Image (cartoon, grey):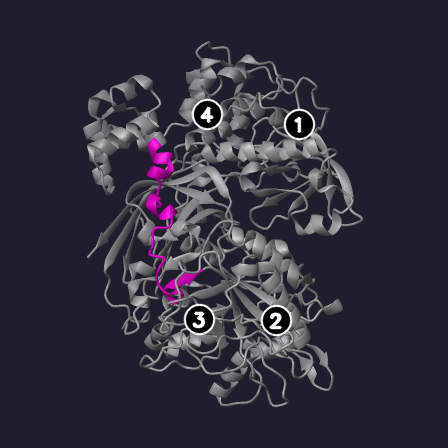
């Protein structure tokens, strides 16, 4: 049970452990680790439930290790690292103590653990340490890698193996087990004198820790109801009773009793009735029996094929009972269609980890992009010293990395998550000599991964499929002779794009965007005045190679450079299926002979102009050719644009700054959440047909009614971990992203103090004003203590549901300033299951906020 072992141990104070959600220890002592193997340390119940208390690697991590943290050649400091008793977080020492939450990292936030010199930092700065002593902990989101060197190879292996076991066990945990870990940690922390008893003051601290500001009278009445011994303390079974009341889910009990009747257990036919009402595909008696055997906790009930309330909750909190369609978590779409028929996860300025003005460049940015399912990465190639091309954001203060190091990262990490093809979008500013070096690196490092010739039996009228190109790397490059401006200098894609826009405007003056970039990023070239960031330095230096020999798949393959015959290897074709080409306004009718190998690169401004002016013609163009869209150069802080507008018109390569979190990246993650997160999602049929009549500006009448009832939320995280009295006032916003006519946003009222405020108080009452336009008022926000409850219904009419993304957002309402973000989850409407569902919330950078959930009822009616 929740506190059986907790109450049986006398515990000595240690540095406080940290939960899987928020680190809020009150003090930061770092006493010597016990020498008894960790068996008598407090809070080990969590690890016991994981089955890891006797594991030698985990016990060594509990004792702690002094590991050398490596940042540079001169910054290499020894620090103490120690696994905490919750098994979900690691405490580490700092030279200068900071806020307690700054002294931990969470196991669930680890993306990968690499052995040896397998990171950019260790390859550059770890030469003094043997590879067998080194490890790298790579995190999800924007947190930097942790490069470490252990005193011995065995100690390094203990951390590598131990973290792998903890991550595997955490991934296998049910939502109920995560909740058990979560509440047990806070229970241990709230027991200030570690006497296994809870006073009312300690209970109040516990409530604040779990984000509940409950009315004192109500909290005390609950305390007294559980205080069976009437001695003003809770202990043993009394604590467990209090926790059960705290975790009670009245709304789930109501649903359960609706189907179970008076006996308060679900028989197989009753469970089948619930599944049918949920709209579950393939609901049968056999399926209902299988669910009972999988999720029921009571062995007696399981033997009689009955499901109790606990088993019912386990099912609804499981992935099988969650809101995303389970079948869509694997590759389920047809992967044998041409590349142009897919949305392809794409990154802009992939090498950057921060802003495009002075941020660092890193090969780790490519590794992280691939870990997020990205299939098209950008390489801005410039001439470097020693004949070695480098990658950076030209004419800025961003740091430089070697081209060959990036290609090695592509080789090592491109196909870890997805087997489907990767496209290297080359922004080439190198002369012929270093272009030859680029070609040599591509050939020698990638080898057979690199596509250098047309596939056998390939239809010349269309691109090959992702299935045909599994494990292969495509190069997107420009053909020679490249476009030049009036002074003979070769133009890049971005510069051509600006000149096109100037011509269309009927003037020769620079656009505001180009002028702004010259002012910020330009520098003086020899006799040419200010040069924008994409300029090439010396005349005659091309961007991407190959000779312009016409178009079509049957034409001779492109070459990156044109070299003498004595260098045949560098002359091998590179840009085979992705020839960079300029795109003006598409023709109203499809071209008689398609040119599938031509890829157009457009700024977001020009893409919007084409969407507005060309409409259906642009969609027809995108039905057979690839189009890449990238952010405006004026986005100095690497901000993103809304990708939905580009997807509406069938653009495949909608490139975003992966290093910048925000709703734009939430939409991108939601779009590619399905199909096994392989980075390829089949476009709707209306965007794949060459003769389609679809126009996102005129999608027709509503075809689908989407109704969602927002019921409750559970275990929402604290936003200010260092302030115990900081409690959220949550509200829920449902956003619809699709064609312009479908885009909408509706909110619930807010629940004061996360459900601990006056019952029935609404956002309008708190703010001193009525509900705003467009807000649903079907329900009334009410207080249930631990789980805020709304019971409000929001409804949307949709005209193009096949393109819709639904974004669930929870915010902390503030009457005097913008609301604070709490969590979100985004997914396509087509992958959303109907019925009662839990939405498992994610943080800003996409990390899990488990056990935080949103409980809703979903109904999708199609006409």
- Indicate which disc residue 570 carries: 2
Direction front: furthest residue: 566
CA distance separating discs 1 and 4 = 29 Å
Residue 241 visible in the picture? yes
Res 481 quadrant in image: bottom right
CA distance separating discs 3 and 2 = 28 Å
Task: Find out whether the residues at labels 4 and 2 contact each other: C-beta distance under 8 Å.
Answer: no
Of the 4 image quadrants, the one containing the C terminus is bottom left
Label 1 vs label 4, nearer the camera: 1
Closer to the camera, 410 or 664?
A: 410
CA distance separating discs 4 and 3 = 60 Å
Is 177 situated above or below 559?
above
Q: Which residues are magenta?
A: 315-344
Q: Residue at image x 61%, y 82%?
A: 490
Label 2 vs label 1, nearer the camera: 2
Which sits earlier in the primary sequence, circle 4 or circle 2? 4
Residue 606: give x, y in percent of width and height. Answer: 47, 76
Q: Residue at image x 33%, y 56%?
A: 334
- Indicate which disc residue 627 carries: 3
Residue 817 visible in the picture? no
Residue at disc 2, secondary structure: helix
In the rendered structure, the answer to whether residue 462 lies left or right of residue 452 reads left
Classed neighbour count for the residue bearing mark 2: other residues with Cα under 10 Å, few (<14), some (14–19), many (≥20): many
- Indicate which disc residue 219 carries: 4
Residue picked out by circle 1: 15
Residue at disc 3, secondary structure: strand
CA distance separating discs 3 and 1 = 54 Å
Which sits earlier in the primary sequence, circle 1 or circle 4? 1
């Amino acid at each position: 049970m929740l506190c059986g072992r907790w109450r049986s141990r006398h515990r000595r104070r240690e540095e406080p452990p940290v939960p899987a959600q928020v680190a809020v220890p009150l003090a930061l002592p770092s006493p010597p680790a016990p020498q008894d193997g960790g068996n008598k340390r407090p809070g080990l119940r969590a690890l016991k439930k994981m089955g890891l208390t006797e594991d030698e690697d985990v016990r060594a991590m509990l004792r702690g290790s002094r590991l050398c943290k490596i940042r540079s050649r001169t910054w290499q400091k020894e620090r103490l690292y120690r696994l905490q008793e919750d098994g979900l977080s690691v405490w580490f020492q700092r030279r200068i103590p900071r806020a307690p939450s700054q002294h931990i990292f969470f196991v669930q936030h680890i993306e990968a653990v690499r052995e040896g010199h397998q990171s950019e930092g260790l390859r550059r700065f770890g030469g003094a340490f043997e590879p067998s002593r080194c490890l790298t902990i790579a995190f999800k989101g924007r947190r930097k890698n942790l490069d470490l060197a252990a005193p011995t190879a065995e100690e390094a292996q203990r951390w590598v193996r131990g973290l792998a076991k903890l991550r595997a066990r955490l991934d296998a945990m049910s939502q109920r087990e995560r909740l058990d870990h979560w509440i047990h940690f806070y229970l241990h922390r709230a027991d200030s004198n570690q006497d296994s008893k809870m006073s009312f003051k300690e209970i109040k601290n516990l409530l604040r820790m779990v984000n509940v500001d409950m009315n004192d009278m109500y909290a005390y009445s609950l305390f007294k109801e559980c205080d069976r011994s009437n001695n003003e303390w809770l202990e043993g079974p009394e604590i467990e009773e209090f926790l059960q009341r705290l975790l009670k889910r009245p709304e789930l009990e109501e649903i359960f009793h609706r189907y179970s009747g008076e006996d308060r257990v679900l028989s197989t036919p009753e469970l089948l009735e619930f599944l049918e009402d949920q709209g579950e595909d393939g609901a049968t008696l056999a399926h209902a029996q299988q669910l009972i055997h999988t999720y029921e906790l009571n062995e007696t009930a399981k033997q009689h094929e009955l499901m109790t309330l606990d088993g019912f909750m386990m099912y609804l909190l499981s992935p099988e009972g969650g809101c995303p369609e389970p079948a869509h978590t694997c590759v389920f779409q047809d992967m044998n269609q041409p590349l142009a028929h897919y949305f392809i996860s794409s990154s802009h300025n992939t090498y950057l980890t921060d802003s495009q003005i002075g941020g660092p460049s890193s090969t780790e940015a490519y590794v992280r992009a691939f870990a997020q399912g990205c299939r098209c990465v950008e390489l801005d190639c410039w001439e470097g010293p020693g004949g070695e091309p480098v990658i950076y954001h030209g004419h800025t203060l961003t740091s430089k990395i070697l081209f060959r190091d990036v290609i090695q990262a592509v080789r090592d990490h491109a196909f870890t998550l997805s087997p489907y093809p990767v496209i290297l979008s080359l922004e080439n500013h190198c002369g012929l000599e270093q272009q030859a070096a680029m070609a040599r690196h591509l050939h020698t490092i990638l080898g057979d991964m690199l596509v250098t010739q047309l596939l056998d039996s390939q239809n010349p009228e269309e691109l090959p499929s992702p299935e045909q190109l599994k494990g292969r790397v495509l190069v997107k490059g420009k053909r020679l002779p490249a476009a030049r401006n009036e002074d003979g200098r070769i133009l890049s894609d971005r510069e051509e794009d600006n000149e096109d826009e100037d011509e269309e405007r009927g003037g020769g003056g620079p656009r505001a965007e180009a002028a702004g970039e010259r002012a910020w990023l330009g520098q003086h070239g020899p006799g040419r005045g200010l040069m924008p960031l994409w300029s090439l330095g010396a005349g005659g230096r091309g961007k991407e190679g190959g000779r312009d020999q016409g178009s079509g798949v049957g034409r001779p393959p492109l070459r990156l450079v044109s070299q003498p015959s004595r260098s045949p290897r560098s002359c091998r074709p590179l840009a085979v299926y992705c020839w960079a080409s300029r795109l003006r306004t598409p023709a109203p009718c499809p071209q008689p002979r398609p040119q599938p190998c031509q890829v157009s690169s457009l700024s977001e401004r020009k893409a919007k102009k084409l969407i507005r002016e060309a409409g259906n013609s642009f969609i027809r163009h995108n039905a057979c050719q690839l189009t890449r869209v990238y952010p405006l150069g004026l986005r100095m802080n690497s901000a993103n644009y809304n990708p939905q507008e580009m997807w509406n018109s069938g653009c495949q390569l909608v490139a975003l700054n992966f290093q910048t979190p925000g709703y734009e990246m939430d939409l991108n993650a939601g779009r590619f959440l399905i199909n096994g997160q392989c980075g390829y999602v089949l476009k709707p049929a209306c965007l794949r047909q060459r003769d389609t009549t679809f126009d996102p500006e005129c999608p027709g009448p509503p075809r689908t009614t989407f109704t969602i009832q927002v019921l409750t939320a559970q275990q929402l995280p604290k936003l200010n971990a260092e302030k115990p009295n900081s409690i959220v006032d949550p509200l829920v916003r449902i956003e619809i992203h699709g064609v312009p006519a479908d885009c909408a946003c509706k909110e619930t009222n807010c629940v004061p103090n996360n459900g601990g405020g006056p019952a029935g108080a609404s956002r309008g009452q708190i703010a001193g004003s009525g509900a705003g336009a467009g807000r649903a008022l079907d329900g009334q926000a009410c207080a249930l203590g631990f789980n805020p409850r709304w019971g409000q219904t929001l409804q949307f009419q949709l005209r193009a549901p096949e393109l819709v993304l639904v974004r669930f957002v929870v915010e902390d309402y503030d009457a005097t300033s913008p609301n604070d973000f709490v969590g979100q989850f985004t997914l396509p409407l087509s992958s959303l299951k109907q019925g009662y569902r839990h939405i498992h919330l994610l943080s800003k950078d996409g990390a899990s906020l488990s056990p935080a959930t949103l409980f809703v009822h979903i109904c999708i009616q199609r006409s």
